[in-house]
Image (spheres, rainbow, N blue to C red):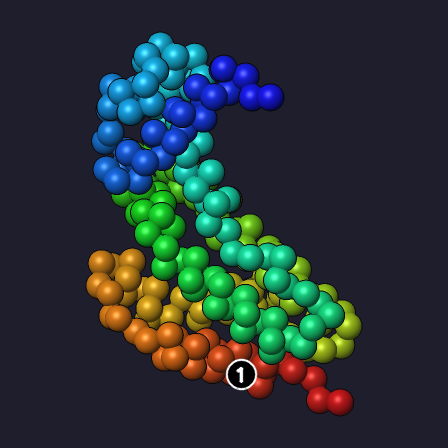
Amino acid sequence: MTSASERKRNRILDAASELFGNYGYAVSMDAISKLADVSKQTIYAHFKTKDILFETCMKDKCLEYQANEGGLDVTLPIDQVLFQFARGFQEMLLKPGAQQTYRNAVANIETHPEFTETYLEYGPERTTKSLACYLQKKVDDGTIELKLSSEEAAVQLLLMFHGKAVYWNYLGCDIAQSEESKERYLRDCVEMFLAKTLKSC
């Protein structure tokens, strides 16, 4: 059973995540306490500083918007796995919450570089490691051959998977790309990668 203290902590996190997501770091602790329906003293009892609260919210959001690492099944055909991963990855990046988390990290890069470090650790670095681990397994079982390290190859793929849909969207421009167009682009990314790495029988 969840304790009263845990329920208050969860209310604080929910309120802070909503307000930080909508307005960024500039949100006041007064606004958070009002939305969470707790006193500021209660907030500080759970989170010693505003920075700690903001960083906790950022970590939680990064974990919430993680790419589907469970879909990297080594027993399935590599083209199928990479395409499904690419589609899920791009869809995740296009969610408003994922975009706002990225913008919050970038907006505070000069004054709070630790926020960017948290974003990198719980967002891009985790996804990169997961994909790199999958690629290394496919190297080890003789499916592909990489000229780059598995981590460098993973970064290369992930940057391609962003595509115009994500890049433009993060700059505030919705290009209204059709699902068919997105799928065609992602399939081509996978095909280009495999054309260079897939080992012939």
Mark 1 sits on what residue?
191
- The residue nearer to you, when weighing 140 against 183, is 183
Label 1 element class: helix
**Quarter location, residue 19:** top left
Of the 4 image quadrants, the one containing the C terminus is bottom right
Looking at this view, name the residue that lies furthest to the front.
Answer: 1
Residue 117 lies in what quarter of the image?
Answer: top left
**Percent of width and height locating residue 125:** 52, 51
The answer, for residue 89, to whether it is visible in the render is yes
- Residue placed farthest to the bottom in the image? 201
| Residue occupying image coordinates x 36% and y 35% | 17
Q: Please indicate whether residue 67 sits to the left or right of residue 108 in the image.
A: right
* In this view, 198 is above or below 109: below
Location of residue 53 (image quadrant) = top left
What amino acid is labelled 1 in the image? Glu
Q: Residue 113 versus residue 29: which sits nearer the camera?
A: 29
Q: Quadrant of the N terminus?
A: top right
State whether residue 41 is above or below residue 66.
Answer: above
Residue 102 visible in rendering: no
Task: Give the residue at x 33% y 71%.
Answer: 164
* Residue at x-position 26% and y-position 40%: 22
Q: Quick check: 1 left or right of 34?
A: right
Q: Residues within 10 Å of mark 1 (few under 14, many from 20)?
A: some
- Pinpoint residue 69: horizontal percent, then vertical percent: 59, 57
Residue 133 rendering spot, x and y as whole percentages: 66, 60
In the image, is 14 to the left or to the right of 89?
A: left
